[in-house]
Image: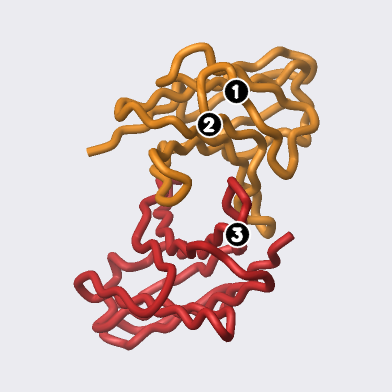
Chain colours: A orange, B red
């Protein structure tokens, strides 16, 4: 079974802090994705990566950056966290551009 | 950009009822996904469709490409089916998925 893990289930940070969200997959998938999920808005794509050191902006990249130094790991970085970045963050990976496997999510609260 | 609409937003039903959740989209797609999200956040992929119909246990998913519409059916619903069901589409030529806002389903015993 594909396993996608995220470093934290719950995270509380202060405004202005730099925040790292880590995602690791164990199935040698080329494609990895970061989404945020907000009530009434559904899931929205922040960034995705289709290869090591490659990244593409999704629908809402502002305020975020990503890093993919190794194939199995895709990091989402909030350079200076703000309260409007309080959300559920979900990572996913896929071998092709079709079926995606999701991690358990990280619920981030920015105070 | 593809617009994905789901209906209903919320649905409460009694155990045993037949459930239908609808999804429509605005632009041609290469694939449509139905996902299930339980309380706590974890998302599981139920189906991926590009045409026709798929069945898995009590779940059935259909898609009509011409009408840009898909339905997810649950037969003999059970309280453990209570979850948020999310429709997501991959537009032709696009890399990421576009998601509907989800349908919150509650099955009461």
Secondary structure of the residue carrying numbered label 1 = loop
Disc 3 from disc 1: Cα separation: 21 Å
Residue A1, compared with residue A81, is above or below; it is: below
Seen from the viewer's position, the closer of residues B36 and B99 is B99
Quadrant in the picture for residue B80: bottom left
Residue B18, compared with residue B8, is above or below; it is: below
**Chain identity of mark 2:** A
Mark 1 lies on residue: A54
* Residue beneath the point at 61% across and 60% down: B91
Disc 2 from disc 3: Cα separation: 17 Å
- Quarter holding the C terminus of chain B is bottom left
- Quarter holding the N terminus of chain B is bottom right
Mark 3 lies on residue: B92
Mark 2 lies on residue: A50
Q: Say the numbered circle drawn on residue B32.
A: none
Q: Are marks 3 and 1 on the same chain?
A: no
Q: Horizontally, is B75 left or right of A8 in the view?
A: left
The mark tally for this picture is: 3
């Amino acid at each position: 079974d594909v396993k996608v893990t995220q470093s934290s289930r719950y995270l509380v940070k202060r405004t202005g802090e730099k925040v790292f969200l880590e995602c690791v997959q164990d199935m040698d998938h080329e494609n990895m994705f970061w989404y945020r999920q907000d009530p009434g808005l559904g899931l929205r794509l922040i960034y995705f990566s289709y290869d090591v050191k490659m990244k593409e902006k999704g629908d809402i990249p502002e305020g975020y950056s990503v890093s993919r130094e190794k194939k199995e790991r895709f990091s989402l970085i909030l350079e200076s966290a703000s309260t409007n970045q309080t959300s559920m963050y979900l990572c996913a990976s896929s071998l092709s551009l079709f079926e995606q496997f999701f991690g358990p999510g990280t619920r981030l609260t920015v105070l | 950009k593809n617009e994905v609409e789901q209906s209903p937003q919320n649905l409460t039903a009694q155990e045993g009822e037949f459930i239908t959740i609808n999804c429509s989209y605005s632009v041609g797609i290469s694939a449509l996904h139905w996902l299930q999200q339980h309380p706590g956040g974890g998302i599981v992929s139920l189906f991926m469709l590009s045409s026709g119909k798929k069945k898995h246990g009590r779940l059935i998913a259909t898609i009509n490409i011409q009408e840009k519409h898909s339905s997810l059916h649950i037969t003999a619903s059970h309280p453990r089916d209570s979850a948020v069901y999310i429709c997501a589409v991959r537009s032709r030529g696009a890399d990421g998925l576009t998601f509907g806002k989800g349908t919150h389903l509650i099955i009461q015993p």
